[in-house]
Image (cartoon, rainbow, N blue to C red):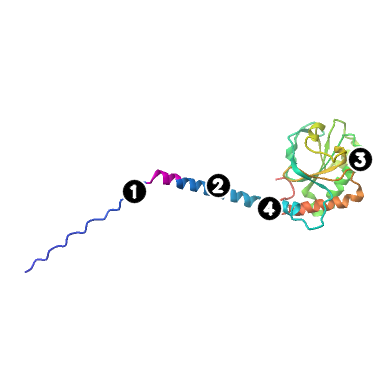
Amino acid sequence: MTERLATPAEPLALTVHGMPVPEGVLTQDARRTRAGRWKMLLLALVCAAPVIASYLSYYVIRPEGRRNFGVLIDPQRPIPAAHATDLSGQPVELPALKGQWLLVSVAGGACDARCENNLYLQRQLREALGKDKDRLDWVWLVDDQARVPDALRPALAKATVVRVPAAELAAWLAPEAGRELREHLYVIDPMGHWMMRFPANLERADAGRAKRDLERLLRASNSWDQPGRP
């Protein structure tokens, strides 16, 4: 009987993995870091897109022949951290007014005829916005220490009245050349930037043109601006 020879066992094949090359690891880390930064930038752009689009639609993509009644401010100026107080003398953080569109007038506390006219126009312009009126606050910045007349106070129930030193206001807002700060109405956007100034000594006959500017601004910011402060 013939013996059958056993086939030798196949040798085990061992795969040896090389150790990572330090330069390769560093390159991979750098790529991951760059990718992470691009993702963060993309996320920031997505979040900011509604704001950017609304400003582009108002400032850049305008129908031919369209004219603003108010003057657009460039560059825009942010609300300063001014030394403000309310009428009772309590400190007020002026930047806390951000989060709403603001229609602002400036006048001394005694409030002359021009001041009263501006306050009337501010109130009427806000009311004329109808369902959007809660997206706009009307603000009187008092630039001296004169007492506000008691007879005027009931009419200011829905207004924001803040005392701010005249010098600090002058470093933020500016009138048309040859005019005074108290002659204009000013528009501040919800991010706290002064961005528009209406013509000096606005008359009631021209209030409709100012209203159209406000309506355009509110319409352009409709996708990201909501009533009330966040």
The mark that comes first in sequence, 3 or 2, is 2
How many numbered marks are there?
4
Q: Residue at the location (92% across, 50% down)? A: 205
Q: Quadrant of the C terminus?
A: top right
Residue 120 forms part of the magenta stretch? no
The residue singled out by tag 2 in the image is 37
The mark that comes first in sequence, 1 or 2, is 1
Q: Quadrant of residue 119?
A: top right
Asked if the residue under mark 1 is in contact with the one under mark 3, i.e. CB atoms within 8 Å, the reply is: no
Can you give x and y, in whole percent of width and height, for residue 6 in the image? 14, 62
- Circle 2 sits in a helix, a strand or a loop, which is it? helix
Q: CA distance from mark 3 to mark 2?
A: 54 Å
Asked if the residue under mark 2 is in contact with the one under mark 4, i.e. CB atoms within 8 Å, the reply is: no
The mark that comes first in sequence, 1 or 4, is 1
Left-right relation of 204 to 226: right
Q: CA distance from mark 4 to mark 3?
A: 38 Å
The amino acid marked with disc number 3 is Arg
